Amino acid sequence: MSIYITLLLFLISFVFKRSKYIAVLFFVFMWTLWGWNTWNGDYDAYLSLFEQSSENLGGYERGYTILNSLFLSMGFSFQDFLIVFSFIVLCPILYISVKSANYPALFSAIYFLIFIQEFVFMRNYLANSLFFIALWLAFIQKKKYKYYYWGIILFSSLFHSTSIMFLIFLPALKGKILNVQYILFYAIIAYGASILIFDLVLPFLGANLIDKYGEYATGGYVTNTSFAHLIIVMAVYKTYKVILKNDFLPTFSKRICTIIVNVNLLSIFYLCLYYHVPYFASRFLRCLSTIDLLFFAIALFYTCGKWRKMKVTFLFAIFVAYIILSLLADTLPYTIIPLYKCNSLWGDEYYVPIL
């Protein structure tokens, strides 16, 4: 049944791209798939962490452990915790997309492909959702949003330490597009510095940090990931140049697009990490894809003229193709298959892959 609902939601999302109600329905459906999920690739590890949380309140990323311990002390089961947790993580993404995207239903449909890859990484998913909130405050220009940004990012690092890297996006919050030449110049310098840091400095920073680094320094394809990252950045930047030619682009939408383009440009610095921590790359690109999807959900609406429309649609197609390819390259027996086969709300078969 859940597979048929997915296909139906995809169909009506592409037909009624501007519908906020369909977007809400799609996110509610995602919540049911995730909140009532009974097994996935990381389920057992998170279950164990939940059950032992009261005994392990120290160390890195203690925010997530404290959160687990709090729910455990209130008598919640891990399944109850997962239902609440998934709701908390998905709500900000839904709210921001409905408030900002001109095609919220289209956003929800493509976002579902990102969600399939993301839901197994609970701590990382929460940190990415908090980053989305931090950007939203910059979008709407809340007073002292830079301080809010600092606070939210530091708070998110309590749940996943790698999110501290989001602080490099602080210059992206400016209302003007950043200088591409300067970014490329300093990115090259940063790449050289990263070699010295990882090869010479890291060994002296303690066993705990080295072990943490080792968790993310395995797997991945450096060249392919770096190439895909640059293609995404280029597609977003080219699209931005096209929509800037539209005189009727609202100030609010223009600010959102400018900040997102700046985030993409500054994300080039992440290329310095891909060689040393390749596994980290795929996680960051899922976060970047969510932000860029919001960008395209605005750009497609405001692009006028036959040739401009075709150009932006083509760039959007490249972006979607990347998301689909990354999904196909994922370990599907640990993500999409259990997402549908292991669910107490839609029919639980307790599927466990035999590989």
Image (cartoon, helix red, strand yellow):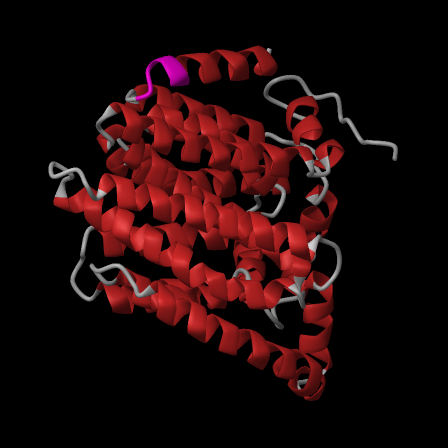
Looking at this view, name the residue that lies furthest to the front: 307
Is 30 situated above or below 273? above
Is 185 situated above or below 43? below
Q: What residue sits 11% from the left and 39% below the top?
A: 247
Q: Is residue 61 visible?
A: no
Q: What residue sits 29% from the left and 20% below the top?
A: 19
Q: Report the predominant secondary structure element of the magenta stretch.
A: helix
Is 6 situated above or below 102? above
Q: Quadrant of the N terminus?
A: top right
Q: What residue sits 46% from the left and 16% below the top?
A: 9
Where is residue 246? Give x, y as percent.
17, 37
Where is residue 189? Give x, y as percent.
50, 78
Q: Quadrant of residue 325?
A: top right
Q: Quadrant of the C terminus?
A: top right
Front residue of this view, candidates 190 and 151: 190
Front residue of this view, candidates 33 and 298: 298
The magenta region covers 13-17
Q: Is residue 246 visible?
A: yes
State yes or no: residue 16 in magenta.
Answer: yes
Is residue 146 rendered to the left or right of residue 213? left
Looking at this view, name the residue that lies furthest to the right: 355
Is 197 situated above or below 228? below
Q: Quadrant of residue 89?
A: top left
Q: What residue sits 69% from the left and 38% below the top?
A: 329
Front residue of this view, candidates 296 and 134: 296
Is residue 82 rendered to the left or right of residue 137? right
Front residue of this view, candidates 343 and 90: 90
Where is residue 251? Give x, y as percent.
13, 46
Where is residue 51? Give x, y as percent.
68, 52
State yes or no: residue 90 in magenta.
Answer: no
